[in-house]
Image: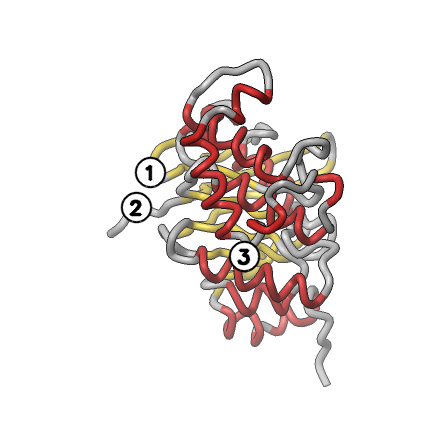
Amino acid sequence: MMTPMLELRGLSKRFGGLTATDDVSLSVPAGALHALIGPNGAGKTTLINQVAGELRHDTGAILLDGMEIGTLPAWERVKRGLSRTFQITQLLPDETALDNVVLAVQARQGHSFHFFADARRNSDARAQAEQLIGEVGLLANAAVRVADLAHGERKQLELAVALASRPSLLLLDEPMAGLSAVESQEMVGLLRKLKGRVTIVLVEHDMDAVFALADRISVLVYGRVVASGDVDEIRANPAVRTAYLGEGDD
């Protein structure tokens, strides 16, 4: 039996009397795209933050490719192969799209630098950054400042930055948030191309995107996994349809 790329065992997090995640267990095979859905406040982002190391879990275990990473700081988890995006893009607005990716490539290479000029002189990092920018469809805007990019383009750029670390596990927190219908379709196309190359955990409210992309879906309600299955199983689950998809019995 192959080792899952990500395995969560009984993960729980409480804030005072509020249980944000409650005994969450799931397994994501290498190369799969696993979606997490649920209503607002269900604990999806809290769960992602625990996996990424930005929030310490109270109980349970987090395994990345069979290795326990739950006690490691966030930067160490990145070194082990984990990368993520955020609901609100985390980019350097006054720098160009290309320079944002160059810096991410240099961070992976372990270079230390004090000025952006140092990054711009790194021809190898620039070549890798240009390839990544091209993969997400932004090569024509490589020299444009992030502040001047459209919202959808910033989402594409953040994906390139996340890929710069060459992750084995990519955590995507609502990559469709704020996108137009056309931009959402473009993002779905980008993520479809990534499937199989990198293991993806996708938190998303856009159910059309989830159903188009996911190999497996877990539904969170009040911090608990109430259902897991493939797309057809989740579509047909009466509890899920009532609690989340907004479809009551006829």
- The CA distance from mark 3 to mark 2 is 19 Å
**Disc 1 or 3, which lies upstream in sequence?**
3
Q: How many marks?
A: 3
Residue 56: image quadrant is top right
Can you give x and y, in whole percent of width and height, for residue 107 in the image? 49, 25
State the mark number for residue 35: 3
Residue 209: image quadrant is bottom right
Residue at image mark 2: 3
Quick check: can you spot residue 62?
no
Q: Cβ–Cβ below 8 Å for labels 2 and 1?
A: yes
State the mark number for residue 66: 1
Q: Cβ–Cβ below 8 Å for labels 1 and 3?
A: no
Could you tell me which residue is drawn at 54 percent across and 39 percent down?
Answer: 161
Numbered disc 2: secondary structure: loop
Q: Going by the image, does 58 lie left or right of 67?
A: right
Quick check: can you spot residue 100?
yes
Can you give x and y, in whole percent of width and height, for residue 39 in the image? 71, 56
Can you give x and y, in whole percent of width and height, for residue 140 in the image? 59, 51
Numbered disc 1: secondary structure: loop
Looking at the rendered structure, the kind of residue marked 3 is: Ala
In the image, residue 34 sits, relative to residue 207, either above or below, namely above
Q: Considering depth in this image, is 243 or 7 the residue closer to the camera?
A: 7
Looking at the rendered structure, the kind of residue marked 1 is: Gly
**Disc 2 or 1, which lies upstream in sequence?**
2
- The CA distance from mark 2 to mark 1 is 6 Å
Can you give x and y, in whole percent of width and height, for residue 230 in the image? 47, 67
Looking at the rendered structure, the kind of residue marked 2 is: Thr
State the mark number for residue 154: none
Q: Considering depth in this image, is 219 or 101 the residue closer to the camera?
A: 101
- The CA distance from mark 1 to mark 3 is 20 Å
* Label 1: how many Cα within 10 Å (few below 14, some 14–19, many 20+): few
Could you tell me which residue is drawn at 52 percent across and 37 percent down?
Answer: 51
